[in-house]
C-alpha cells in the first residue's frame, strides 16, 4: 500500500488536478499517514531530493523521462538526484 500525492508542482501531464500541493502539502501528507507516500506532478532532477526531504518514499515521473532526448539517462539522473535509491 502507498499514497500517491500530487500534483506537487504544475505539470502538463496532469491538467485536472487543481492547485499544486507544493512542498508544504507533501510534507503534511507524509506526516499524516503511516504508509509510504509517492510524490507525483512536476518531478524533475532539480527537485527530486526535495521530495525525499519532505518524507516521500519515492517519485512518479512521466514527462521528465518520456520527453527527454535520452530517457535512460534522464531516469538515471532522477535516481541519483533522489538520493541513489530507486525512486520510480
Image (cartoon, grey):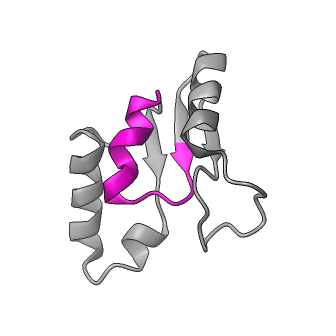
Q: Quadrant of residue 49?
A: top left
Residue that appears at 57% across and 57% down? 41
| Residue 44: % across, % down | 39, 60
Residue 52: give x, y in percent of width and height: 39, 34
Instruction: Locate residue 8, reporting x and y percent.
Output: 59, 49
Q: Is residue 9 above or below residue 12?
A: above
The magenta segment is 39-55
Q: Quadrant of residue 15?
A: bottom right
Q: Residue at x 49, y 66 (%)?
A: 62
Image-based side of 41 in relation to 73, left or right:
right
Quadrant of the snapshot with the N terminus: top right
Q: Is residue 78 above or below residue 5?
A: below
Q: Is residue 48 magenta?
A: yes
Residue 33 visible in the displayed image: no
Q: Residue at x 21, y 68 (%)?
A: 73
Residue appearing at x 54%, y 40% in the figure: 23
Q: Is residue 84 magenta?
A: no
Amino acid at each position: 500500500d502507498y499514497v500517491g500525492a500530487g500534483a506537487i508542482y504544475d505539470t502538463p501531464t496532469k491538467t485536472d488536478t487543481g492547485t499544486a500541493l507544493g512542498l508544504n502539502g507533501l510534507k503534511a501528507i507524509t506526516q499524516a499517514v503511516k504508509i509510504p507516500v509517492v510524490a507525483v506532478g512536476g518531478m524533475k532532477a532539480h527537485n527530486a531530493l526535495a521530495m525525499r526531504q519532505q518524507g516521500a518514499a519515492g517519485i512518479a515521473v512521466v514527462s521528465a523521462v518520456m520527453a527527454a532526448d535520452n530517457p535512460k539517462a534522464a531516469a538515471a539522473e532522477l535516481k541519483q538526484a533522489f538520493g541513489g535509491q530507486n525512486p520510480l
